[in-house]
Amino acid sequence: MRAGVIGAGSIGGVVARALRDGGVPGATLSGVVDPAGPADLPVVRPDELLSTSDLVVEAAGQRALAELGPRVLAAGLDLLVVSVGALADDALLETLLSAGPGELHLSTGAIGGLDLLRAAARMAPLARVTIETTKLAANLVQPWMTAAEAERLRTTEVPVELLRGAAREVTAAFPKSANVAASVALAAGSWDVVEAAVIADPAATVTSHVITAEGPAGSYRFEIRNRPSPVTPTSSEVVPHAVLSALAALAEPRVVFR
Ligand SMILES: NC(=O)c1ccc[n+]([C@@H]2O[C@H](COP(=O)([O-])OP(=O)(O)OC[C@H]3O[C@@H](n4cnc5c(N)ncnc54)[C@H](O)[C@@H]3O)[C@@H](O)[C@H]2O)c1
């Protein structure tokens, strides 16, 4: 499987280098598209990537997904999306779903439990789903915050709940939390049933996501405690490895949970 990578930053860079170094049996790196052009990776133009790949990993951000995702799928290549938060835009999701013949795959990214949520929701609609994200307070400062609010986050000595509400509203306010909330909403089959919360903890050494769901199939609680990436502390170190695990399953299926 010839895999190309769009966006070779903290996630895509790890993925591209692992592919280049033979870290995924059955897969090779076809090229990388990134205006930042990492010197140690084979940077190519988008049209070149499309003509030399079987699958493309998008790890470049929401705008790049909207621009390049439909082209990748229309060219008959599979697309593995990391910027899942972009799919809070129903129109973009529909565009990607109908852009094929390529197949759309979503990375599980920073969280898990999505398979069971999907199974439970398939049996009968879930009544209530929550996702509560706790991060190091200083990493939650947003451009829309006033100087006083930002300073309070940097200096708080106790955990502060910044926002709790409909998942769409919370992801709009905290785009870095959008990926996990969108993954939960897509697995649950509904945005309306999902409540999200963002908590700033001055002492957090891990980024945690507590996901709960209740419905006729049962009640579920998943607690994820991810170590932040040492390079990009706002992201979790495991995320590129979720992408590599998906690539391994697509390249040479062995033990695969679906
Ligand atoms: N699914 C999840 O659980 C999850 C978890 C963490 C991050 N993410 C998402 O993954 C994406 C990548 O995150 P990151 O931490 O690696 O970001 P990053 O900023 O470290 O890297 C992004 C890279 O994409 C490049 N880029 C930007 N626009 C581009 C374009 N149009 N074409 C090609 N390359 C372009 C940038 O130059 C940069 O090198 C983000 O959207 C982020 O929100 C998803």
Image (cartoon, rainbow, N blue to C red):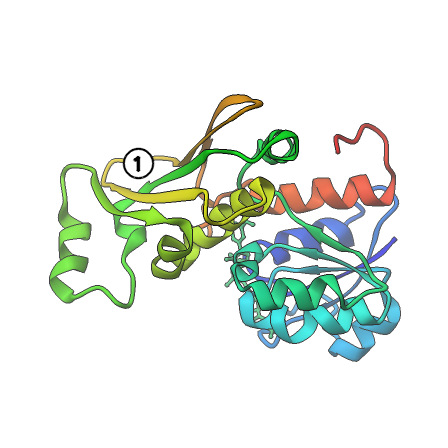
Tell me which residue sits at (53%, 42%) in the image.
Answer: 184
Closer to the camera, 16 or 156?
A: 156
Give x and y (percent) for residue 190: 53, 47
- Residue extending farthest left: 148
* Location of mark 1 (residue): 204
Tell me which residue sits at (75%, 68%) in the image.
Answer: 42
Give x and y (percent) for residue 187: 60, 41
Question: Ligand 1: does it lie within 8 Å of the C-beta at label 1?
Answer: no
Give x and y (percent) for residue 26: 88, 45
203 versus 167 height, above or below: above
- Kindly state the secondary structure of the residue where label 1 is placed: loop
Q: From this viewpoint, is residue 232 visible?
A: no
Q: Amino acid at mark 1?
A: Ala
202 versus 81 height, above or below: above
Give x and y (percent) for residue 186: 58, 47
Quarter occupied by residue 211? top left
**Relative to 9, is 69 on the left or the right?**
right
168 versus 68 height, above or below: above
Q: From this viewpoint, is residue 36 visible?
A: yes
Quarter occupied by residue 37? bottom right
Closer to the camera, 140 or 98?
A: 98
Closer to the camera, 101 or 188?
A: 188
**Relative to 256, is 156 on the left or the right?**
left
